Image (cartoon, grey):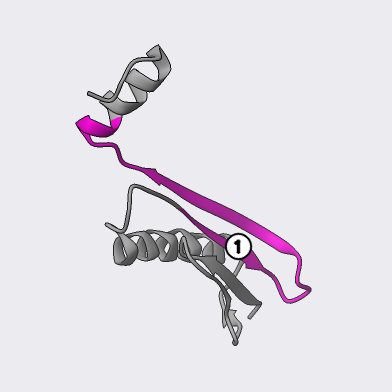
Amino acid sequence: MPKYRYTTHDGEKTSRADESLEFPDDKSAADEAQRGLADIAKEKLPDGSQTEFRITVEDENEDVIYQASLKFKGETAEDKRRARNKKDGGSNT
C-alpha cells in the first residue's frame, strides 16, 4: 500500500510527521488530510482574531499530491467600527 507523509501548520508552528501513513490511494490520503485540517482548526480555535491552518500531503517520492488551507478571520463590532473610522479618516471614538 502506498505511503504518505503530512506536514501541518497550526497557525503557530509547522510540523512534519516523523512516520508515513499508508492509504490505498492519493484520494484517500487527501480525504484524511481534510479531516485532519478540520481537527487542527477545532483544536486551536478560538485563539485570536485571525490565523491560517495548512496541510500538505507528500507521496513516497516526496512529491506533493495535495495541499489545503483554512483561513480564519473574526471581527467584533468594535473592530469593524475602528476599521471604518480609519478608512474614513475619522477618530476611534
Question: Total label count?
Answer: 1
Residue 21 in the image: above or below residue 76: below
* Badge 1 amino acid: Thr
Left or right: 25 with respect to 42?
right
Camera-nearest residue between 82 and 15 = 82
Residue that extends furthest to the top in the rendered view of this protein: 88
- Which residue is depicted at the point 62% across and 75% down? 5
Q: Is residue 83 magenta?
A: no
Residue 3: x and y in percent read: 64, 79
- Which residue is depicted at the point 31% across and 41% down? 74
Residue 13: x and y in percent read: 52, 69
Residue 54: x and y in percent read: 53, 58
Question: What residue did someone put label 1 on?
Answer: 56
Left or right: 27 with respect to 79?
right
* Quadrant location of the C terminus in the rendered image: top left
- Which residue is depicted at the point 47% across and 66% down? 32
Residue 29: x and y in percent read: 55, 67
Q: Main secondary structure of the magenta part?
A: strand
Residue 17 in the image: above or below residue 49: below
* Quadrant location of the N terminus in the rendered image: bottom right
Identify the magenta region: 52-79
Mark 1 packing: few (<14 Cα in 10 Å), some, or many (20+)? many
User: Element at badge 1?
Assistant: strand
